[in-house]
Image (cartoon, rainbow, N blue to C red):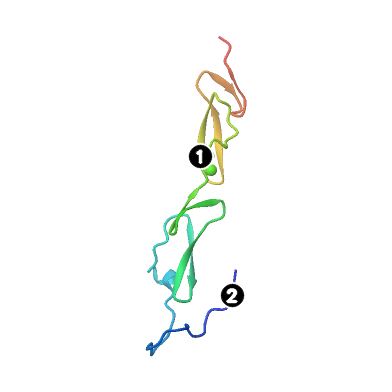
Amino acid sequence: MGGAVGGAVGGAVGVTACFYIDECATQMHYCQSNTVCVNLPGGHRCDCLPGFIRVDEYSCTEHDECASSQSSCDVNAICTNTIRGHLCTCKPGYVGNGTICRGKPL
Ligand SMILES: [Ca+2]
């Protein structure tokens, strides 16, 4: 992070006053959920929060391991996406820790 902010904007002919608007501070930004607004000279950008993946320029989403088949759930478990992880719960009729589920003995 960091970096100097300041100095003239190159090629801005005819601009008599030059100051930066912090879009992040003024809420004049379009950063959607799960992002951090980063003020830049002449604009801003939306960085994804740690653990989130980019959807588009303005929004990020939490990594859904369940949807991307990257969960550690048993085939007989229900995968629930959570922030920075996911939960595995054995389906009704199965017992186990979610990673391994076995059919309940009748
Ligand atoms: Ca997740």
Per the rendering, the mark at residue 81 is 1
Q: The disc labelled 2 sits on which kind of residue?
A: Gly
Up-down relation of residue 69 to residue 9 (above or below)? above
Is residue 25 rendered to the left or right of residue 97? left
Snapshot quadrant of residue 33: bottom left
Q: Percent from the top left, x then y, of residue 8?
A: 49, 85
Q: Nearer the viewer, residue 66 or 101?
A: 66
**Residue behind mark 2:** 3
Q: Residues within 10 Å of mark 2 (few under 14, many from 20)?
A: few
Label 1 beta carbon less than 8 Å to ligand 1: yes
Is residue 9 rendered to the left or right of residue 104? left
Q: Percent from the top left, x then y, of residue 48?
A: 51, 57
- Helix, strand or loop status at disc 1: strand
- Helix, strand or loop status at disc 2: loop
Up-down relation of residue 29 to residue 75 (above or below)? below
Q: Earlier in the sequence, mark 2 or mark 1?
A: 2
The residue sitting at 42% across, 84% down in the picture is 12
Mark 2–mark 1 distance (CA, rounded to whole Å):
36 Å
| Quarter of the figure that contains the N terminus | bottom right
Q: Percent from the top left, x then y, of residue 66?
A: 52, 36
Query: Depth-wise, is mark 2 or mark 1 nearer the camera?
Result: 2
Is residue 98 rendered to the left or right of residue 26? right
The residue sitting at 57% across, 15% down in the picture is 104
